Amino acid sequence: MAGTIEVLVPGGQANPGPPLGPELGPTPVDVQAVVSEINEQTAAFDGTEVPVTVEYEDDGSFTIDVGVPPTAALVKDELGFETGSGVPQEDFVADASVEQIKKIAEQKLPDLLAYDLKGAAKEVVGTCTSLGVTIEGENPREFKEKIDAGEYDEVFAEAPEA
């Protein structure tokens, strides 16, 4: 009877109601224990929808795997807006700082195809392009060209491994 449940929950705000409760109710796991562990592991993504996989065994034991929210959700959360622009090349909805782009790239790096932080930052900038978000007041495409030219190599350098 062991199984796997995949759900989207608001970071740090999961509860025993839907979608978790109905899925976990018929299983041998302690629903409140699962909810508590999910909230602990997703606290950094406060309120942002986070993909979570719960694997459980017949004896009631469980493991939780927390994914990373979609890049667009991280950008919206970091910059505090609800929806992107309907005309992203003309109407801009927010302006991000280089540090905000770096923070989102660091959160998203394990989930991306990028090999390094610079590549991850370029993927985040691509999402900003489609959402209608400027970076340091300029068009994200121009900002990406500056990343490619090496102007931000120091900012997006990999942190040395401890």
Image (cartoon, helix red, strand yellow):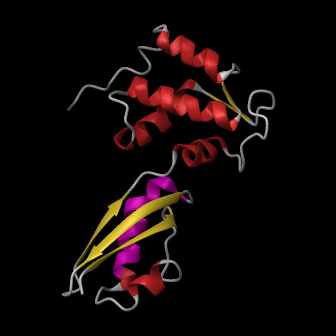
Percent across and percent down for residue 100 are 55, 33
| Front residue (pair 78, 115) | 115
Q: Which residue is drawn at 48% across and 35% down?
A: 103
Percent across and percent down for residue 56 are 26, 78
Determine whether 36 is above or below 79 in the image.
below
Magenta span: predominant SS is helix
Q: In which quarter of the image is the N terminus?
A: bottom left
Q: In which quarter of the image is the C terminus?
A: top left
The reply to whether the magenta stretch includes residue 6 is: no
Q: Residue at x 79, y 35 (%)?
A: 87
| Front residue (pair 31, 119) | 119
Percent across and percent down for residue 113 are 37, 35
Determine whether 39 is above or below 123 in the image.
below
Q: Which residue is drawn at 53% across and 80% down?
A: 18
Q: Is residue 126 left or right of residue 58?
A: right
Which residues, given as a range, are shown in magenta? 33-46
Determine whether 143 is above or below 15 in the image.
above
Q: Is residue 138 left or right of residue 106?
A: right
| Front residue (pair 36, 28) | 28
